[in-house]
Image: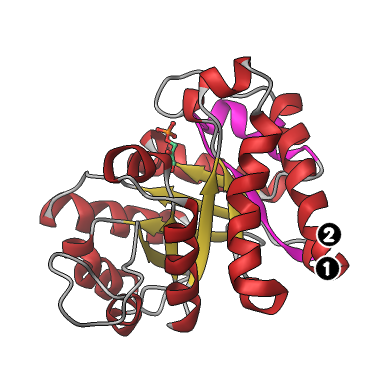
Amino acid sequence: MRRPLVCGNWKLNGSIGKTGQLIDALVSGMTGIDGVDIAVCPVFVHLPLACERAAGTALHIGVQDVSDQAQGAFTGEVGAGMAAEFGARIAILGHSERRARHGETDAGVAAKFIAARGAGLTPILCVGETLAERDAGDTLAVVTRQLDTVLEMTGVAGFGDGVIAYEPVWAIGTGRTATPEQAQEVHAALRGRLAAHDAALGEGARIVYGGSMKGANAGELMAMPDIDGGLIGGASLDADEFLAIARAAVAA
Ligand code: 13P
């Protein structure tokens, strides 16, 4: 039985005041919600604040990216070890917004995956197709390529406790969620790909869904056999809505 993961991707949102309030609301609202890992990923500058407020609680804090380098002449980048030193435990990698806006490649994302694992962070590898790719019937080819590049560079042992997030680009921030069946088809294919490398990895790896997930649709998505939680954007900025998703993960 895989333990579900519900992770908020706060993207470019928050402030000293709002981030602190939201962390406090989550920590107090999480009481009694057991059987699910709950995490949020604020912007880098709010990481120390978030880690301090969440210290000693069950709320995990993560980051939205890391450098593939540990340190050195890499202006503007943040090393995974630097984030881990503050208490970050998770790193979202290869989000479609970064692939599109920053030209991140499959190989570049794989290098970040290795850096994150090396610093003890749990990577969440984002994969997903655009609407044009789905319409062309290329969905499984795209997500398989995105996963394979990482697996080829890490090997099975290097993939470790890595999490995959299936995030169809057309469902992100659009209010248009993949149907449970559409998502399950892709999740099952990704799990099959992991299993082809290693049966235990296929069985144990968590594959979460992201794309307009909210309290009202989380239950039916997470009821699918290969959907082990969610990576949530907009709805994670509202403590009640986000915790409703966490409860749905426990019930699924
Ligand atoms: P939304 O939940 O806002 O659609 O965003 C999903 C996402 O991109 C999470 O990484």
State whether residue 186 is above or below residue 95. above
Name the residue located 33 percent from the left edge and 66 percent from the top edge.
66
Per the model, the C-alpha gap separating discs 2 and 1 is: 5 Å
Q: Nearer the viewer, residue 201 or 209?
A: 201
Give the x, y percent position of residue 16: 12, 57
Residue range corresponding to the magenta coloring: 203-224
Q: Nearer the viewer, residue 59 or 73?
A: 73
Q: Secondary structure at mark 1?
A: loop
Which numbered marker is on residue 195?
2
Name the residue located 61 percent from the left edge and 37 percent from the top edge.
142
Q: Is residue 181 left or right of residue 230?
A: right
Name the residue located 69 percent from the left edge and 50 percent from the top edge.
228
Quadrant of the image where one finds ligand 1: top left
Give the residue type that dot 2 points to.
Answer: Ala
State whether residue 141 is above or below residue 8. above
State whether residue 24 is above or below residue 12. below
Q: Is residue 206 left or right of residue 95?
A: right
Residue hosting label 1? 198
Q: Secondary structure at mark 2?
A: helix
Q: Nearer the viewer, residue 48 or 191?
A: 191
State whether residue 110 is above or below residue 138. below
Q: Is residue 76 left or right of residue 42?
A: left
Q: Residues within 10 Å of mark 2 (few under 14, many from 20)?
A: some
Do callouts 2 and 1 mark residues in contact (Cβ within 8 Å)?
yes
